[in-house]
Each structure stands twice: as structure tokens, then as C-alpha cells.
Amino acid sequence: MLARGSKGSDVLELQLNLMKLGYNPGSCNGFYDARTEEAVMLMQKDSKIPISGIVNQETEKLIYQLLHQMSTNMHKSSQHRESTSFDPAHA
């Protein structure tokens, strides 16, 4: 579990993941401060799970699900662009 006051590599990973998901945790410095807590709370609110500002098992699972969805969507988008790009050989 991570909460305000936590510090270390797990917090840094959380902060970097929040950034990837579009939530600004402030400085990515490995310290769970008020900005990191606010970013977690906003993500929890947007995902309609209980808003606590604490990264428990449910919130951690959600983060990895969102990252996986984002990765899958980016992969599909890149495949779509490749299949629909202009090919002068077939023009």
C-alpha cells in the first residue's frame, strides 16, 4: 500500500505511471506528497472507484489495467495507420 508520506522506487514507479495515464503527480521524485495524492484521487474519481488517495490493491490493479488498455489501443492505432497509409506502388 502506498499513501502520502511513502517514499522509494515504488512511489517513483507510481508517479511515472500516473504521468503516462495523463495524471500529473508533480515531481517524479519517489516521494508520495500532496500532488501525488491528488493525482491518485483524480484517477480514482475518473475510474469510479472509492476515492481515498491511497494506492491499495484495487487501485494498483486499476493502474495496470489502464496502462494495458492504453498500450493495446496504441498498438491497434499504429496497426490501423500502417494498413491505411498511402502506398505509391498501389496508386
Image (tube, rainbow, N blue to C red):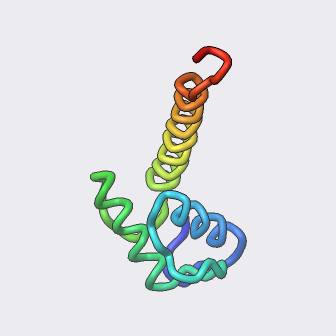
Quadrant occupied by the N terminus:
bottom right
Toward the top, the furthest residue is 90
Q: Is residue 34 above or below residue 91?
A: below
Q: Is residue 46 above or below residue 25?
A: above
In the depicted view, which residue is nearer to us: 19 or 63? 19
Horizontal and vertical percent position of residue 63: 50, 52
In the depicted view, which residue is nearer to us: 7 or 1? 7
* Identity of the residue drawn at 61% across and 66% down: 16
- Asked which quadrant contains residue 6, the reply is bottom right
In the depicted view, which residue is nearer to us: 69 or 10? 69
* Identity of the residue drawn at 29% across and 61% down: 45
* Identity of the residue drawn at 61% across and 82% down: 31
Quadrant occupied by the C terminus:
top right
Horizontal and vertical percent position of residue 74: 55, 40
* Identity of the residue drawn at 57% across and 22% down: 83
Horizontal and vertical percent position of residue 89: 67, 18
